[in-house]
Image (cartoon, grey):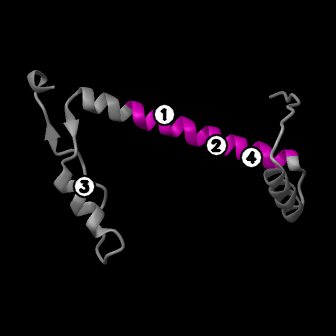
Amino acid sequence: MGEEPLSLHLEDKLRQSLENEARLREVPEAEVAEEAIREFLDRQAWLRRELAEAVREADEGVFISQEAMERWIDSWGAEGELPPPEPDIFLPPKER
C-alpha cells in the first residue's frame, strides 16, 4: 500500500496536543495523526453501517419497545445489568 503526503492546517492547541502525544509515545507526529484519522474514519464507517441496519429494520417494521429500552437503561450500573434488548415489535407490512 502506497503513501502520499498530506498537508494539514491545525489549530495551535490541537497541534500542541499532537506534538505532545508523539513525544510521549516517542513516535513521529505523522504516525499519531494517521492513527487518529484511521480511528475516526473506522468509527464513521461503523456508525453508517449501524444506521443503515437500523433504517433497514425500521423499513421492515422491526423495533424495540420503549418499555424494553427503559428496563435495559434502568439496569445500567446495577447488579445483574440486563443485556441490550432484542426487537420485540414486528409490524405487518400494512402498518408500516
* Vertical placement of residue 5 versus 29, above or below: above
Q: Position of residue 9 (x, y in %)?
A: 84, 38
Question: Mark 3: which secondary structure?
Answer: helix
User: Magenta part of the protein: which range?
Assistant: 30-52
Q: Which residue is mark 4?
A: 35
Three-letter amino acid code of the residue under disc 2: Phe
Three-letter amino acid code of the residue under disc 3: Met
Residue placed at 19% from the left, 31% from the top? Answer: 61
Q: Earlier in the sequence, mark 3 or mark 1?
A: 1
Q: Earlier in the sequence, mark 1 or mark 2?
A: 2
Question: Mark 1: which secondary structure?
Answer: helix
Marks 1/4: CA distance?
20 Å
Marks 1/2: CA distance?
12 Å
Q: Are marks 3 and 1 in contact (CB under 8 Å)?
A: no
Q: Earlier in the sequence, mark 1 or mark 4?
A: 4
Question: Mark 2: which secondary structure?
Answer: helix
Q: Nearer the viewer, mark 4 or mark 3?
A: 3
Three-letter amino acid code of the residue under disc 1: Arg
Q: Are marks 4 and 3 in contact (CB under 8 Å)?
A: no
Q: Which residue is mark 1?
A: 48
Residue placed at 84% from the left, 27% from the top? Answer: 2
Q: Which residue is mark 3?
A: 69
Specify few, some or many for label 3: CA neighbours under 10 Å numbering under 14, 14-19, or 20 or more: some
Q: Which residue is mark 2?
A: 40
Q: Earlier in the sequence, mark 3 or mark 2?
A: 2
Q: Nearer the viewer, mark 4 or mark 2?
A: 2
Q: Quadrant of the C terminus?
A: top left
Q: Is residue 50 found inside the magenta-colored segment of the image? A: yes
